[in-house]
């Protein structure tokens, strides 16, 4: 599922969305070893590898909903 990188990282508990926007503009975030230089940036949470300052971010799997 493709989502904005700010939402994905905020949901993972990295930082707030505004702080993540600043990190992108500072050149601190990479997706699949490519520097993210502008917003919006969409990522696929099941396939993309996201790193901040070279450290890979482990994304929490989405909670399952049972009905």
Image: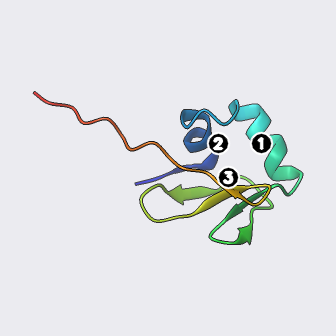
Task: Tell me if residue 37 comes above or below residue 6 in the rendering.
Answer: below
| Residue beneath the point at 86% across and 51% down | 25
Q: Residue furthest bottom?
A: 33
Task: Tell me if residue 34 comes above or below residue 36 in the rendering.
Answer: below
| Residue beneath the point at 61% across and 35% down | 10
Q: Earlier in the sequence, mark 2 or mark 3?
A: 2
Q: Secondary structure at mark 2?
A: helix
In the image, taking residue 57 as reference, residue 37 lies left or right, namely right
Q: Secondary structure at mark 3?
A: loop
Residue hosting label 1 = 21
Residue hosting label 3 = 40
- CB under 8 Å between callouts 2 and 3? no
Q: Earlier in the sequence, mark 1 or mark 2?
A: 2
Q: Position of residue 3 (x, y in %)?
A: 51, 49
Q: Quadrant of residue 17?
A: top right
| Residue beneath the point at 67% across and 52% down | 40
Q: Position of residue 19 (x, y in %)?
A: 78, 34
Nearer to us in this view, 7 or 63 = 63
Q: Position of residue 64 (x, y in %)?
A: 24, 36
Q: Position of residue 43 (x, y in %)?
A: 54, 58
The circle drawn on residue 29 is none
| Residue beneath the point at 69% across and 72% down | 33
Residue hosting label 2 = 6
Q: Quadrant of the N terminus?
A: bottom left
- CB under 8 Å between callouts 1 and 2? yes
Frontmost of labels 1 and 3 is 1
The colour scheme used to paint the residues is rainbow
Crowdedness near tag 3: few (<14), some (14–19) or many (≥20) residues, C-alpha within 10 Å:
few
Crowdedness near tag 2: few (<14), some (14–19) or many (≥20) residues, C-alpha within 10 Å:
many
């Amino acid at each position: 599922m493709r989502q904005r990188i700010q939402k994905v990282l905020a949901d993972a508990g990295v930082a707030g969305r505004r702080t993540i926007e600043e990190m992108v503009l500072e050149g601190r975030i990479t997706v699949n070893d490519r520097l993210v230089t502008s917003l919006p940036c969409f990522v696929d949470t099941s396939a993309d590898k996201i790193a901040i300052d070279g450290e890979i971010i482990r994304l929490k799997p989405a909670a399952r909903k049972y009905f």
